[in-house]
Image: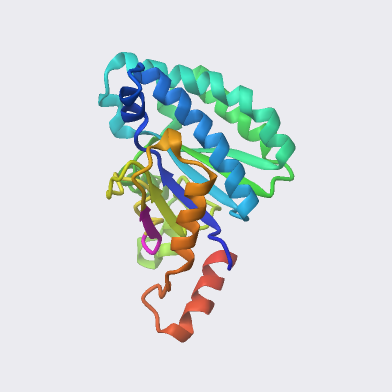
Amino acid sequence: MTPPVHIGIIMDGNNRWARQRLLPREAGHRAGVESIRRVAEACETAGVRVLTVYGFSTENWARPSDEVAFLMQLFEETIPREVPELAERGIELRFSGRIEELSPSLQQLMRDANLKTRDNAHAVLNIAVNYGGRSEIVDAIRAMARAGADLRTLDEAAVSDFLYTQGLPDPDLIIRTAGEMRLSNFLLWQSAYAEFYSTPTLWPDFGEADLEQALVAYQSRVRRFGARPEEEVSHRARQVNG
């Protein structure tokens, strides 16, 4: 069966994974980074064109300062290390969120990573960093105001063009690990018709077999998008083809 075009993942459970092993939180976050690599490769093999992972939310700034500092350092270490392989595999590395609020050095790494991976890419790995779904909608409205958008003719497609995910299809499937059942401010606009799948597996343990289970569950569902059965295919075709 046809795989989802776009999967979004709320990666949860790094700290629990570390506590279960009597390890520091940092070990859980490092293990979580390895899971991103593993799952991205599995998505590519399965034919998924876009993978968006929730790397750091706008709410995560409230975590202990040493943990936040470590996460920012982990981004700075990981991004340049992964870029050559992503470019070789034809995967564009994108970042979505209030990137301008991050350190100048991290912003530059993100810009460079996108420039080095976007040519001839057939797939996208989109990292949501300093991201919040409500903030994204607010920022889109502000951007439309700056652009002089006519609110009288505004439609959903126009709003989508001002979101961080501009140019990407809406997610078909949202996966959340560690047994949680919340969207937690992730892709609120884009996930209006996405299927939701929760697994008890902690994110550092999530792998190819877990992804396969999520895909099986997704493919067993009938997606109507609020339409009559005979309208499903045409609606999905319009969404994918823009």
Of 205 and 38, the residue lying toward us: 205
State the residue lying farthest toward the top.
66
Query: In the image, what residue occupies the spot 56% across and 65% down?
Result: 240
Is 127 included in the stretch rendered in magenta?
A: no
Quadrant where the C terminus lies? Answer: bottom right
Q: Nearer the viewer, residue 133 or 50?
A: 50
Q: Is residue 242 visible?
A: no
State the residue at coordinates (40%, 72%): 225
Residue at horizontal 27 percent and vertical 50 percent from the top = 181
Q: For residue 217, what is the image quadrant?
A: bottom left
Count of marks, rendered view: 0
Please name the residue shown 50% across and 50% down the image: 211
Measured as percent of width and height from the top left, residue 99 is found at 45, 31
Q: Position of residue 237 (x, y in %)?
A: 56, 72
Magenta run includes residue 196: yes
Give, as a single range, the part of the protein colored magenta.
Answer: 192-197
Front residue of 32/57: it is 32
Q: Is residue 238 visible?
A: yes
Quadrant in the picture for the N terminus: bottom right
Please say if 234 is above or below 47: below
Q: Is residue 82 left or right of residue 75?
A: right
Observer-nearest of 203 and 90 = 203
The colour scheme used to paint the residues is rainbow
Position above or below: 16 against 161: above
Q: Position of residue 126 (x, y in %)?
A: 52, 41
